[in-house]
Image (tube, grey):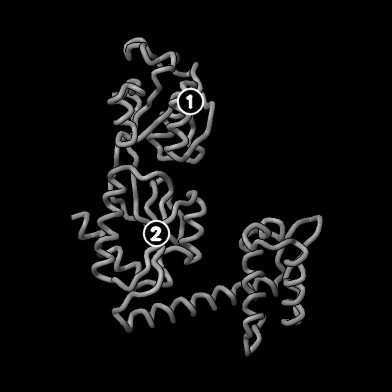
Amino acid sequence: MAKLPKNLSQHDIKLLRVFQTVVDCGGFTAAETELNIGRSTISIYISNLEQRLKLSLCQRGRQGFSLTQEGQAVYNAIQQLEQAHQQFSQLVAGLTDECSGELVILTADQLDQSRLNLLSKLCAALQQQAPQLQLALDVLPLQQIELALLKDQAHLALMPGYRQIDGLQYQHVFSTPIFLCCAASHPLFGVSDAAISDEVLAHYPAIHPGVDINPEGRKQLQKLQAGARAYQFDTRLALLLSGGYIGFLPEEIARPYIDSQQLRYIKPGDYQYPFNQSIVSKQTPRDSAKVQLVLNILQTLLT
């Protein structure tokens, strides 16, 4: 089995991380964006690592990217090295009750009132129980959130339960109904629900969220004609208010526009589905003490 150098320098670690990212991404081209460096630079790094290890790690060319047997062994060793680092971090974190440094919480879209209330209560409790923590809240696309959690670049996320992937754990927090809507300038605004059939709806362009949502919502979307794509609720609202599309909005976001008659619900008894929200974290996070603190607070807030 391939062995890493006995004394790993910072440069060695950098080269190993580049190699790991290339393998995770499936090749040099896909790794360019993740590493934010060009293919030629990546190639130089991999060549330097191969010289350092005196091994051929991968095949790259017209036939694509593939690992050699030695490359697979080195990649496995890197995974073991990361696990050992995580175990060490968890051990040190367990030796002290103090949580300090940055705590990163991500969300996937515009916050409705329920999620805003939950996050504000969570932040207030964190400030009281761990004032030395520096809170960092940000919004990212769903796939980037999942990657950030897996890479320990974020600690937790509040996101819709559209899928579950290995390495992450999910805690359901609440559901809100999401309804099919149209604007006052849309042809269906003045049509009664009794006169609106599935066939009628299929003739009008609809807004698709652009991701694979839960099964209930998927069944609803399959009845409609996709004419635009918008995952974020504020951009979806803009498309709706244009009068050119029908689309789904959570009740809490749609309500003020419903009350002012800028929007209406279309057959709300039939065209609705639950918008499930979960707190998501890594199963074995590097900063386990911080993550556990948040989960303990959430358990208190939700009971």
Q: Is residue 288 left or right of residue 297?
A: right
Q: Residue furthest front?
A: 260
Query: Which type of secondary structure does the marked residue at label 1 adopt?
Result: strand
As drawn, 218 above or below 183:
below
Frontmost residue, 74 versus 39: 39
The three-letter amino acid code for the residue at tag 2 is Ile
Frontmost residue, 18 versus 126: 126
* Residue denoted by label 1: 206
Q: Please identify the quadrant where the C terminus is shown.
A: bottom left
Give the Cα separation between the discs numbered 1 and 2.
32 Å
Q: Please identify the quadrant where the N terminus is shown.
A: bottom right
As drawn, 215 above or below 161:
above
**Residue 170 image point, x, y percent:** 36, 55
The three-letter amino acid code for the residue at tag 1 is Ala
Q: Residue at x 65, y 61 (%)?
A: 36
**Dividing the picture into quarters, in which one does residue 295 lie?**
bottom left
Q: Residue furthest left?
A: 303
Total labels: the figure holds 2
**Residue 233 image point, x, y percent:** 42, 38
**Comparing marks 1 and 2, which lies closer to the viewer?**
2
**Dividing the picture into quarters, in which one does residue 194 lie?**
top left
Q: Is residue 228 left or right of residue 168?
A: right
Q: Residue furthest bottom?
A: 6
**Residue 241 image point, x, y percent:** 43, 26
Q: Residues within 10 Å of mark 2 (few under 14, many from 20)?
A: many
Frontmost residue, 18 versus 216: 18
Question: Does residue 273 appear in the picture of this structure?
Answer: no
> What numbered label is drawn on residue 105?
2
Q: Residue at x 50, y 36 (%)?
A: 230
> What numbered label is drawn on residue 120?
none
Question: Does residue 126 appear in the picture of this structure?
Answer: yes
